[in-house]
Amino acid sequence: KAGVTQTPRYLIKTRGQQVTLSCSPISGHRSVSWYQQTPGQGLQFLFEYFSETQRNKGNFPGRFSGRQFSNSRSEMNVSTLELGDSALYLCASSLEGKGYQPQHFGDGTRLSIL
Amino acid sequence: DQQVKQNSPSLSVQEGRISILNCDYTNSMFDYFLWYKKYPAEGPTFLISISSIKDKNEDGRFTVFLNKSAKHLSLHIVPSQPGDSAVYFCAASVGGSGNEKLTFGTGTRLTIIP
């Protein structure tokens, strides 16, 4: 069974640019969550989507946004990139999004801002 | 405010012995807890979870214990194997529909000594 797939694996951008990251959840999973991992802040929740609707959002500025498509695939967008946005961005999916179910993670997109 | 804490950044254990990883939380609303293992350049891999209605859950070599009164959980790995060397993250959530947000600890690096 295929796992969570994230593309691209690595990305280099410059300050002020924007970026779009993609996530394909495990087949049949309907909830997709995004996390940012940095050495200083650890793993932090960005947002979660279910049935194309954002249900929960973490404490990140509005430059971070996302969406989910009808096939449950999700994209995350970061606009006006800052040096501090350099991080590993992880996507996770779960079956029904009802809680009390584990989330399964992809291998992430490593974003570097120059 | 660190709601989930892993106070030991690292732990070394001899192969074949028991590894015990600890995690404390402060938010009494958390009622679903998970452990993830992470290798470098890979996403976190789900290991085991427990809901607050239980105090123990076992899966093969992995056992998670939950002490709600102390707001403490631990992961026991018996026997420890070289492949268990990785960073282990404790995570917690307020279970229920729409509450997919996981709050992570800062991780414990486990090294199994052959």
Image (cartoon, rainbow, N blue to C red):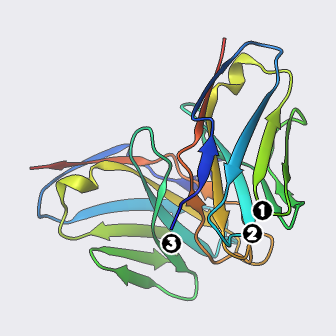
Residues tagged 1 and 2 counted as in contact (Cβ below 8 A): yes
Mark 3 secondary-structure assignment: loop
Q: Nearer the viewer, residue A113 or B109?
A: A113
Return the residue nearer the eye: B92 or A30. Answer: A30
Q: Would you say B95 lies left or right of B111 here?
A: right
- Helix or strand or loop: what does disc 2 sit on? loop
Chain ID of residue with mark 1: A
Relative horizontal placement of residue B86, taking residue A90 as reference (left or right): left
Residue at horizontal 30 percent and vertical 69 percent from the top: B76
> Viewed as shown, does residue A11 lie left or right of B62?
right
Closer to the chain start, of discs 1 and 2, is 2
Tell if the residue under mark 1 belongs to the same chain as the one under mark 3.
Answer: no
For label 3, the crowd category at 10 Å Cα-Cα, with few meaning under 14, some 14 to 19 and many 20 or more, is few
Say above or below: A11 vs B38. above
Whether labels 2 and 3 belong to a single chain: the reply is no
Q: Residue at x 51, y 78 (%)?
A: B50
Residue sitting at 78 percent across and 45 percent down?
A: A75
Tell me which corner region of the image, top left, top right, bottom left or bottom right, holds residue B22. Answer: bottom left
**Marker disc for residue A30:** 2
Name the residue type under label 2. Answer: Arg
Residue B4 coordinates in the image, percent (x, y): 57, 56
Hey, what amino acid is under mark 1? Ser
Q: Residues within 10 Å of mark 2 (few under 14, many from 20)?
A: many
Q: Quadrant of the C terminus of chain A?
A: top right
Provide the residue designation for mark 3: B70
Q: Amino acid at mark 3?
A: Ala
In this view of the protein, which residue sits in the foreground, A20 or B51?
A20
Pinpoint the chain carrying mark 3.
B
For label 1, the residue is: A72
Subunit bearing disc 2:
A
Q: Residue furthest bottom?
A: B53
Task: Determine the CA span between mark 1 and mark 2.
Answer: 6 Å
